[in-house]
Image (cartoon, helix red, strand yellow):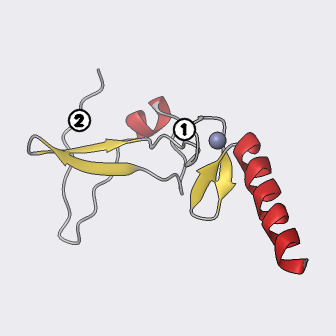
Amino acid sequence: MLSFLVKYADDGRVTIPREIRSHLKLKGGTDLAMKVEDGNIVISKPEHRCFVCGSDKVIPFGEKYICEECKAELKKVFEDEHKDIQQ
Ligand SMILES: [Zn+2]
């Protein structure tokens, strides 16, 4: 287990030690999830899952994530509805 003591700055910033960043292969700009659990701050790599079916093989879709299958299905539904409007 990697364990460090870090300083909490006046402006709210906390630096994740290089050893942890390297171990978890974190790059600048990576989204991290933060929550309070049992009085502790827990920071984790968020799991990106399809907002329709829950698959973990996803691509960004606006502010959410979607899998290729659901994206194709949504596109089909949208196109079908659009046809109804035109008729
Ligand atoms: Zn899906």
Toward the front, the furthest residue is 87
Residues 13 and 65: in front is 65
Residue 12, placed above or below residue 24: below
On the rendering, which quadrant does ligand 1 occupy? Answer: top right
Image coordinates for residue 55, horizontal then vertical, percent: 60, 35
Q: Residue at x 58, y 47 (%)?
A: 52
Crowding near the residue tagged with mark 1, few <14, some 14–19, many ≥20 C-alpha atoms within 10 Å: few
**Amino acid carrying mark 1 in the image:** Gly
Q: Earlier in the sequence, mark 1 or mark 2?
A: 2
Label 1 CB sits under 8 Å from any ligand 1 atom: yes
Give the quadrant of residue 11. bottom left
Toward the right, the furthest residue is 87
Look at the numbered discs 1 and 2 and tell me whether their residues touch, using CB distance below 8 Å. no
Image coordinates for residue 25, horizontal then vertical, percent: 53, 35
Q: CA distance from mark 1 to mark 2?
A: 34 Å
Quadrant location, the C terminus: bottom right
Q: Residue at x 75, y 43 (%)?
A: 68
Quadrant location, the N terminus: top left
Q: Which mark is residue 54?
A: 1
Image coordinates for residue 76, horizontal then vertical, percent: 82, 55
Looking at the image, residue 19 sits to the left or right of residue 68; the answer is left
Give the quadrant of residue 74. bottom right
Residues 16 and 66: in front is 66
Label 2 CB sits under 8 Å from any ligand 1 atom: no
**Amino acid carrying mark 2 in the image:** Phe
Give the quadrant of residue 14. bottom left
The residue carrying mark 2 is 4
Crowding near the residue tagged with mark 2, few <14, some 14–19, many ≥20 C-alpha atoms within 10 Å: few
Residue 15, placed above or below residue 68: below
Q: Which mark is residue 33?
A: none
Looking at the image, residue 62 sits to the left or right of residue 46; the answer is right
Q: Residue at x 75, y 41 (%)?
A: 69
